[in-house]
Amino acid sequence: PSQSLVNAFRTTGNGLPLDNYNALNSFNTSEKYDPRLFHTVAIPGLPYKYSSKRTYEESWNRNPAEYSVYASLKDNVDPDCDCFVPMVPFYANTKNRIVLRFADVLLMRAEALIELHRSAEALPLINQVRTRAKNSTALTGYANDKTLIETYKNGDNIVWNEENARKALRWERRLELAMENGRFFDLVRWGIADQAMNAYYDAEKSRRSYYSSAHFTADRNEYLPIPEAQIRLSKYLYKQNPGY
């Protein structure tokens, strides 16, 4: 997980996502975060997978200077679980991989409603996901003093128009489904991959030198090139993707 992702979980004093979220270069214990952070990212100094026996350290990461000091908690298990499979120097588990979750379905429907100009119907769906997140702190008591999340209340903490609904939906997908391999495809579907990726590179290049020349080219980098061999096998019915 990147620093940008950890920062994305920061919340305002009223428990909503923070617009200027990406101003920090490390996890800050004096800040407030969406509780889903502590189910998503292993943070140095905090228990790993809710276990009082293990405190995550950045040295667990094979190269903190290159990959960041954090690690993913998604798809990983407590080493005391009988499903844990040591594969030195790595580790794995025998659990089935979750491909689709109910929260994803709720957010899919909310997105469709917003794009159909029915954003009022999307509000309770997004809040259903946020309410679950708000109630997800039973296993993370060690971090509860650092968490703050609230649902959206039209006319109270947000003006729930179509623009703000779309913004809230997209942010909700980023947090709820973080480290589940769908973020890039969301950005492509929304047509903002170049904006989001280049903003990410701009923020991360000061933290990771290998991003110093990184740039996402719109209408090219959304897709990989089609292998030339496959184009020939199709008798040139396949057309190469733009930019390759």
Image: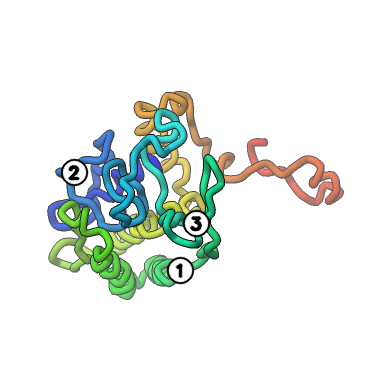
Q: Please state which amino acid type lies under the numbered disc 1.
A: Arg
Residue under pointer 3: 84
Q: Do the residues labelled 1 and 2 touch (CB within 8 Å)?
A: no
Count of numbered circles on the image: 3
**Which residue is located at x 44 percent, y 52 percent?**
179
Give 79 or 65, whichever is nearer the viewer.
Answer: 79
Give 218 or 10, whichever is nearer the viewer.
Answer: 10
Specify the quadrant that holds the N terminus: top left
Residue under pointer 1: 101
Instruction: Kindly report the distance in space between the C-alpha atoms of the residues bearing marks 3 and 2.
Output: 30 Å
**Which residue is located at x 18 percent, y 43 percent?**
29
Q: Please state which amino acid type lies under the numbered disc 2.
A: Thr
Residue under pointer 2: 29
N-term mark: 1 or 3: 3
Please provide percent x and percent y for residue 230: 80, 46
Q: How crowded is mark 1: few (under 14 residues within 10 Å), some or many (20 or more)?
A: few
